[in-house]
Image (cartoon, grey):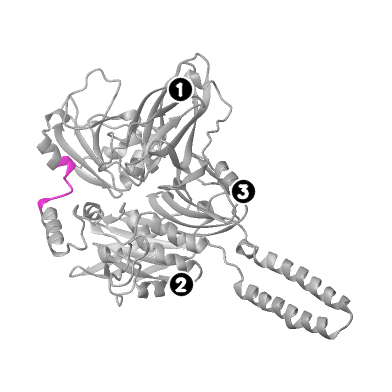
């Protein structure tokens, strides 16, 4: 019991700070969530912190961000951001925590004292906004109905932009380098840009970094994103006009009519908000399956055989020798030899994992940004045998981590940014969940769509040339066209549609079969249908990961517990290709603590 109390005491959160400058010389002047003060939950969202060095000498230190429940109890791991400031410098620092829900309290520290901590404003949950970008140094700002965002608050990585719907521009923002690239990546993945007239009544002309916006067309696409020019100044919009022309321009009266019909005809399937209820959650179902794949197995048949052999040695073996021979020396020799031998045998066979190594099991979703770049979301379970500090780091930039814990304190630190590291203090035979985002650059070309053919809106042919596109051989491939899912045959350097296979409606494909006549688990959640479990159990090796494709495809659309019909519509044009492969080396994390690694990547590509 004393050992348990000691371990529990050691797990309590105790702030630790790297040796740095005097924390009294740093002032946190202002903080802000998201792009307009509201955030989309279950996403990495930007948190902006304005800090000031009140001394004339450089300042170096750390900002530590943690979540607390009911003001005191911390849960999840601590997010750490290194900060360096010149003398008297004022700067905005961006952190990107993963917000599970709006019941969380967030605390920011930069030193050990009571005056080195602030409680952040509460998280306000809301839908992804469309904001007007403005120059905060401009002398005069016109009054408009649009919510505003200063141009310097746009993130420097696409991995922080999931909670942003659209951008309104009536002047060229001063975005260069990483910020301009993040903006283009966000647009490629499905962002919406509205270009309005400037004060002179003309469309702005954008610099080289944003030259792709200088098209003469009034409407055009950049990847899956949408750009529209509206010949009107921002201050001339009424709320009604802004709602119809910008905020809801992707949702027509016909769409609303269809949504209401769905609600009336399928009340048990559709949520009150117009989304189709799903039978999986955004993260937890993936982690639950990975937990099963990562668990350590003991050699139970050999253990049982050893038990029977040990019992047989004692009786009748030792019993016969002890009763039939007068010389007891042989009895004691056999008894102690058997005891020592089987003690060693049970000690070796009974180890966690049967002498296995620390392992990881992971699935990655890699959405193509073009030119060999990918926006990567990864779900990983780390399984540990012996206690100690364990760490992992991922390749890429704009790296953010989260343990997605809703109730449990995690003794560890999450360092974001290029070269980010997630480190944990792990007890023996424990597992840790880790969610990460990163922008990864490769030299791999995208698969080439060779062509597709329709007849009476029915797909007749579809093929892709995948020569050199993957380091590993594809395990599974499918394409989505006009809301239908088509499984593709994998041939040498070719993916091809077989007309003999019937397509599946995407909304039906994303729903894992549920048998509501069977029993429920302890949380009141219905267990999957028997036939679906049986099918998954037939899969072996990397094929086991195919059972995770549904929630991964849902994540690629940004779905959570339900299908957002508006998002589904915005991706209805064109072709989306998914290819599942073994995790390539340049997508693997770097760590000596987990030598046994296994995982897959689901690549996603969009074609016009």
Q: Which residue is mark 2?
A: 539
Q: Secondary structure at mark 2?
A: loop
Residue 116, image x, y percentages = 47, 24
Compare residues 542 and 413 and report the one nearer the observer: 413
Compare residues 482 and 385 and report the one nearer the observer: 385
Q: CA distance from mark 2 to mark 3?
A: 42 Å
Compare residues 466 and 246 and report the one nearer the observer: 246
Is 589 located above or below residue 340 in the figure?
above
**Mark 2 vs mark 1: in front:** 1
Q: Dot 1, how many residues are within 10 Å of its Cα: few (below 14), some (14-19), or many (20+)?
A: few
| Res. 467 visible in picture | no
The residue sitting at 41% across, 38% down in the picture is: 68
1 or 3: tag closer to the N-terminus: 3
Q: Which residues are magenta?
A: 245-253
Q: Secondary structure at mark 1?
A: helix
Q: Dot 2, how many residues are within 10 Å of its Cα: few (below 14), some (14-19), or many (20+)?
A: few
The disc placed on residue 270 is none
């Amino acid at each position: 019991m004393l050992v348990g109390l000691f371990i529990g005491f050691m797990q309590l959160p105790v702030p630790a700070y790297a040796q740095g400058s005097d924390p009294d010389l740093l002032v946190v002047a202002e903080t802000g969530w998201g792009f307009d003060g509201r955030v989309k939950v279950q996403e990495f969202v930007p948190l902006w912190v304005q800090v000031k060095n009140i001394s004339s000498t450089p300042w170096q230190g750390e900002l530590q961000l943690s979540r607390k429940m009911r003001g005191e109890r911390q849960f999840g791991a601590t997010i750490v951001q290194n900060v360096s400031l010149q003398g008297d410098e004022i700067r905005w620092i961006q952190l990107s925590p993963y917000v599970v829900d709006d019941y969380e309290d967030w605390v920011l520290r930069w030193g050990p004292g009571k005056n080195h901590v602030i409680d952040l404003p509460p998280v306000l949950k809301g839908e992804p906004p469309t904001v007007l970008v403005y120059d905060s140094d401009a002398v005069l700002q016109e009054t408009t109905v649009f919510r505003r965002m200063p141009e310097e608050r746009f993130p420097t990585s696409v991995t922080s932009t999931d909670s942003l719907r659209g951008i309104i521009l009536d002047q060229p923002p001063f975005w260069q380098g990483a910020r301009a690239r993040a903006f283009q990546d966000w647009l490629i993945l499905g962002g919406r840009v509205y270009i309005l007239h400037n004060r002179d009544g003309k469309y702005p002309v954008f610099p080289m970094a944003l030259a792709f916006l200088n098209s003469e067309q009034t409407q055009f696409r950049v990847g899956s994103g949408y750009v529209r020019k509206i010949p009107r100044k921002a201050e001339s919009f009424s709320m009604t006009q802004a709602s119809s022309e910008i905020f809801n321009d992707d949702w027509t009266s016909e769409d609303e009519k269809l949504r209401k019909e769905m609600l009336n005809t399928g009340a048990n399937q559709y949520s009150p908000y117009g989304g189709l209820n799903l039978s999986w959650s955004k993260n937890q179902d993936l982690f639950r399956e990975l937990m099963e794949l990562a668990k350590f197995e003991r050699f139970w048949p050999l253990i049982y055989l050893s038990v029977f052999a040990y019992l047989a040695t004692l009786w009748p073996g030792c019993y016969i020798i002890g009763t039939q021979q007068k010389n007891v020396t042989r009895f004691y020799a056999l008894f102690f030899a058997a005891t020592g031998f089987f003690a060693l045998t049970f000690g070796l066979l009974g180890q966690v994992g049967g002498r296995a190594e620390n392992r990881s099991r992971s699935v990655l979703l890699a959405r193509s940004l073009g030119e060999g770049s990918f926006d990567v979301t990864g779900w990983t379970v780390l399984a540990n045998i012996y206690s100690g500090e364990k760490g992992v780091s991922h390749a890429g930039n704009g790296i953010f981590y989260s343990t997605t814990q809703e109730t449990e304190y995690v003794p560890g630190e999450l360092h974001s940014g290029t070269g980010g590291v997630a480190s944990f203090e792990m007890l023996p035979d424990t597992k840790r969940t880790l969610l990460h985002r990163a922008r990864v650059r490769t030299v791999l070309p995208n698969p080439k769509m060779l062509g597709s053919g329709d007849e009476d809106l029915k797909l007749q042919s579809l093929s892709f040339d995948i020569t050199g596109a993957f380091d590993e051989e594809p395990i599974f491939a499918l394409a989505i066209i006009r809301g239908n899912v088509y499984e593709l045959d994998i041939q040498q350097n070719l993916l091809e549609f077989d007309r003999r296979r019937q397509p599946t409606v995407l909304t039906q494909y994303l729903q894992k079969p549920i048998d509501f006549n069977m029993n429920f688990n302890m949380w009141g959640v219905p267990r999957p249908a028997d036939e679906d479990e049986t099918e998954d159990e037939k899969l072996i090796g990397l094929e086991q990961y195919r059972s995770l494709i549904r929630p991964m495809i849902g994540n690629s659309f940004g779905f959570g517990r339900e299908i957002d019909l508006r998002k589904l519509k915005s991706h209805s044009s064109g072709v989306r290709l998914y290819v599942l492969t073994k995790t390539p080396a340049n997508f693997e994390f770097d760590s000596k603590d987990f030598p046994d690694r296994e995982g897959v990547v689901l690549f996603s590509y969009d074609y016009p």
